[in-house]
Amino acid sequence: MPVSIRDRMADAIRFLSLDAIERATDGHPGAPLGCAEIITALFTRHMKFDPQNPLWPDRDRFVLSNGHGSMLLYSALHLSGYEGISIDEIRNFRVLGSHTHGHPERAPELGIEVTTGPLGQGIANAVGMAVAEARLAAFIGPDIVDHRTFALVGDGCLMEGVGQEVISLAGHLRLGKLCFLWDDNRITDDGSTDLSISEDVRGRFRIAGWQVIDVDGHDIDAVTEALKAADADEHPSMIACTTVIGRGLPRLEGRRGAHGGRVYSADLVEAREAAGWTHGLFEVPSDVYKAWTDGASVRNRPNVAAWEAAVAALPANRRAEFERLMRGDLPDGWREMLTAHRKRLAEEATTRSSNEATAEIVNLLAETIPELLPGAPDLEGPTNCKGKLVAFTAEEPTGRYLHYGIREHAMGSMMNGIVAHGGVLPLGATYLVFSDYMRPALRMAALMDLPVVTIYSHDSIGIGRNGPTHQPVEYLASLRAMPNMAVFRPADAVETAECWELALDRRGGPSSMICSRQPLQALRCDGGTQNKSAAGAYVLAEAEGGPRTVTLLATGSEVALAVAARDRLQADGVATAVVSMPCWELFEAQSVAYRNAVLGPGTIRVGVEAAVRQGWDRWIGPNGGFVGMTGFGASGASDDLYRHFGITVGAIVEQAKSRIEKNFEQISLAQF
Amino acid sequence: MPVSIRDRMADAIRFLSLDAIERATDGHPGAPLGCAEIITALFTRHMKFDPQNPLWPDRDRFVLSNGHGSMLLYSALHLSGYEGISIDEIRNFRVLGSHTHGHPERAPELGIEVTTGPLGQGIANAVGMAVAEARLAAFIGPDIVDHRTFALVGDGCLMEGVGQEVISLAGHLRLGKLCFLWDDNRITDDGSTDLSISEDVRGRFRIAGWQVIDVDGHDIDAVTEALKAADADEHPSMIACTTVIGRGLPRLEGRRGAHGGRVYSADLVEAREAAGWTHGLFEVPSDVYKAWTDGASVRNRPNVAAWEAAVAALPANRRAEFERLMRGDLPDGWREMLTAHRKRLAEEATTRSSNEATAEIVNLLAETIPELLPGAPDLEGPTNCKGKLVAFTAEEPTGRYLHYGIREHAMGSMMNGIVAHGGVLPLGATYLVFSDYMRPALRMAALMDLPVVTIYSHDSIGIGRNGPTHQPVEYLASLRAMPNMAVFRPADAVETAECWELALDRRGGPSSMICSRQPLQALRCDGGTQNKSAAGAYVLAEAEGGPRTVTLLATGSEVALAVAARDRLQADGVATAVVSMPCWELFEAQSVAYRNAVLGPGTIRVGVEAAVRQGWDRWIGPNGGFVGMTGFGASGASDDLYRHFGITVGAIVEQAKSRIEKNFEQISLAQF
């Protein structure tokens, strides 16, 4: 019996994937083989997108959450007609320099919406995308914004905590345009799923308010019907697709080894025989190519045309607003607003925590930036970024504040999805210690170059009595260790406003806005219009009465201690400068000349930060002093803790003076 | 109507808590007031423990997972008769130097089994404790080990991903002696739980295989009956206790502000009037004290006596074994085994990955150490620590390998619980990139001084084609930033064996064993019995032909590159030493003299590590060179990536030579 074109479309995925994985001598065959029919149904019969217009704003979003099955996606993208995924790219799967990476890496122009691989991240991104769509549709109108988000998901994503968090929240938010397709193959890397899970996964979705549809994942027609049923329901849908892992690879299908096992050239022969696939390596017959592009591209062209007409028919101001949102530009006026605010702060010289200063700015931004969507994981009160905003809910999609629940990881990953989608600007706020809960998401934002801004309040032992569980000491170092993460720790309200301008300007990566709980004295009353924090570090107070002998370097709440220490040292005749370093990453990018002018090589340098020393040696040199933490904090009043841990004006003065007395030259280069 | 002694026992918790929170001007009244009856029932009528013998090995474990309600625990411990929690401690709640910290901090002798506060961690610890109990009971016998684990849990713990992970796994493992008491008060910090959750929480437990019991949380008799029903069931039980948050505090009860709102002196008066509590501040009448100690301590004395008799009746060798396990000592012979293995490795000089070398050691340890419980989150194959071990399951509690499922965070937090329980030695193994998923658990291990060892394989771009999502670059820095975490990165099989000895010897904090996927050349063929890694860093190859000009410092897989670079430099007449630095934390603890002897101050120093530079400036000084990563990795073959990112023998030689040519003195102190 000849194989139908329908089934050969799926087989084309199988053989492109097998050939590529065999050639790479590395890869995961299980998902591309097991999900070939699911993806054929989704891409060629259901999903609204156009490979000829890959960045079409109203396209449906697809996320391969089980990113190890990357060849599934690359095969489908190639067959769909994405120019960037040529047959040569398929041949060069996993070769340095190709676009067909081991795991998919965000490139919307190639049809890859997000980087996936670390499990659970992808479906959480998808939930964020569905939130962005719902919020944007409510703002712009459903004639312009009306698309769906699909995610293919394996068992791993559903076992991961972050996956569980977003299942719960997506159900609560009743994201009706969200659909997960579960590759229910009953196999993980260890073997049978029975080894580690016995819960009713379908039931888990149902109790969270999802529609659950069961389907044979190898029946393209049945999957197509299920997708229609998903569309028709007002709840998010989970289509449980029963599949055979590695289907079509006789040696491995249905077995543990199929997940990530090696594919050999003999397998290519055997699989071809089993499927009746008579074509050579990386060869796809023209009727199969045509059926794919008809299904994926031609089918959707009327949709694109209709949408373009609807956009053209928008009133000019609405259209301009929509186009601005799609470009990711902020509305005019935000910078002027922020500059005026900064000037006011400098004039008023008010003592306030950088948390308060941030909340004030977020509330101002919310007035200027309609796409702003602040939110917090159940810390609305302490982080205080809600202001007058109404909550975003199933009933109020025009709402502009997101209650994430006590789900930090979900917040982080959903923000990535929201930013990757575009048109909505999320701002998540939590305590700095909880950044560890969302760290895998922060890493993905950094890796995807996504400009995601997170606010972290309660940044040190300065929080006081809640104790060491809630006192960050290693977090500045661990966030600074992450490539492409900008870490801002402002010293007062004016610096806070400066750092906000910089974070909003940053388009190629995430920012962490680190804020104190305790009040910070106003240090910057200059009122100038120059954003001094833009250089990452600057001389806040130059030495007086002679050439600089001592340079005190500090960030955030400790800059005030350095200023007080300078007063004492100057009074004792020691010419001392204070350098504020709100953003190391920006400072690192300055010229050597500027950095040397700020750091004062040859002077006695003391770093001050209520955190661990790691990283400071870069700035203070081998003879430098450091006043900070050497271990975890403790439960007690903030002032008691600063004294207890020796982070005091006296300690800074003593560190500087003891180095002057020892005579700089006598200190061996490796004396620590 | 006079208030019964039963209800006054609960009121005693309320007033001690209120008085303490008011005095501290800070704290969370909601849980102590809302759960007073639950804890009274559990502590005075049900739980098997004895405040006079706080370390009794067969005591039931209690975890306050909603750690912000710490005064609930301190009040109950004081009333139960724990000497260390005196009334003065209660008065000094949240004062620096007291034991009554803002959140409970592990101190089993005071009745505090684990440190809690970051939500979700406590219940995951509890699941780990229940695993330890089941495993230990299977090993030692149910006449000696037969106790339960109880956790009080709030909404936050159940929303957190890690909580969801352990609910699933505990149900799968059918941990029948585990019982959660859910403080179902329908209020979180943001307000009504309706803001962020609408799922059927009871249903979520049921579909995971838990028994769910509903009860009025303010009815001591009903809670007691529910606890009996929990005991009787072979599944883990969740008792859903309907409560009123802040009950007994008229101004706040049932309201959002009750969670963490300030308590004022007027509240103490109002609450006393409402409850008919006529006693002064911090005053508990003697009949209430007596009822508490009768219930908590006297009730349990026969249990302790019977248990002591059973232990005394054990055959001497079984008894000695049990006592060894309870002390946390390893069995005789492990060190000799490891030393012999190391010697053999040095003789054979075999090239193998440190991942393979580690797996081999774990398999050997499993033969020697019966309490060893390796496990992995669905990476049994790649981490390869199962060997011949049978899986630990509901049916096979004698099993010695734990399939955690794709739940890294659960693994981390459960290991903390297992180690806190004692008697079982868990070893979790996963990829280094997934350590971020468990980072909040790692922090708790470090904070609790728990000797938890985690194995991280696939430690750099050396993994190759899986790409940047799976290539750690910032992880060495972020783990080293954590206080009390020892990070081991061995350079070959011999160093791997040395590091294992050090990790197993380390009793006061966690260890991270960082392993390569790619094969590592044998560098240590000395065969000596000295554990050179014990100093954290050592001179692997001294300079020859003159005083040392260059010092190359490296870790792990990059040490071999440094050795090859040294060969070239020596051939060119540059006297060059190689320093291997398997554990920075141990090196930091050495004398200045030793560190200087190793680091070679005044020589040209170049650090080599396939990771970011952060932290290296401490060792290489301001004129030092660094060969490593400056950003994320890429997808490609391992060798291609090392070349692409310039981590090569040539680059190391060039870094050293360019510094020699420039003349050390001419390099400004702040040239970066």
Image: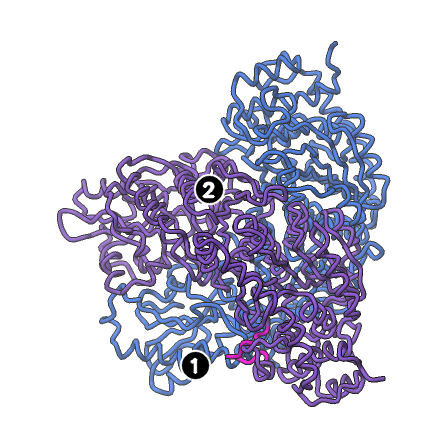
Chain colours: A blue, B purple
Which range is magenta? B93-102
Q: Identify the element where label 1 is drawn.
A: helix
Residue located 40% across and 76% down the image: A577
Q: Viewed as shown, does residue B563 lie left or right of B384?
A: left
The quadrant holding residue A637 is bottom right
Residue A439 or residue B104, whichever sits in front:
B104
Residue A360 horizontal/vertical position (percent)? 67, 71
**What type is the residue that disc 1 sits on?**
Val
Q: Of circles 2 and 1, which is in front?
A: 2
**What type is the residue that disc 2 sits on?**
His
In the rendered view of the protein, which quadrant contains the C terminus of chain A? bottom left
Q: Is residue A323 magenta?
A: no
Residue A311 horizontal/vertical position (percent)? 80, 44
Q: CA distance from mark 2 to mark 1?
A: 45 Å
Q: Height in image: A71 above or below B172?
A: above
Residue B501 or residue A614, whichever sits in front:
B501
| Residue A319 visible in the displayed image | no
Q: Height in image: A255 above or below A198?
A: above
Residue located 13% across and 47% down the image: B545
Q: Is residue B97 magenta?
A: yes
Residue B534 horizontal/vertical position (percent)? 31, 55
Residue located 53% across and 43% down the image: B401
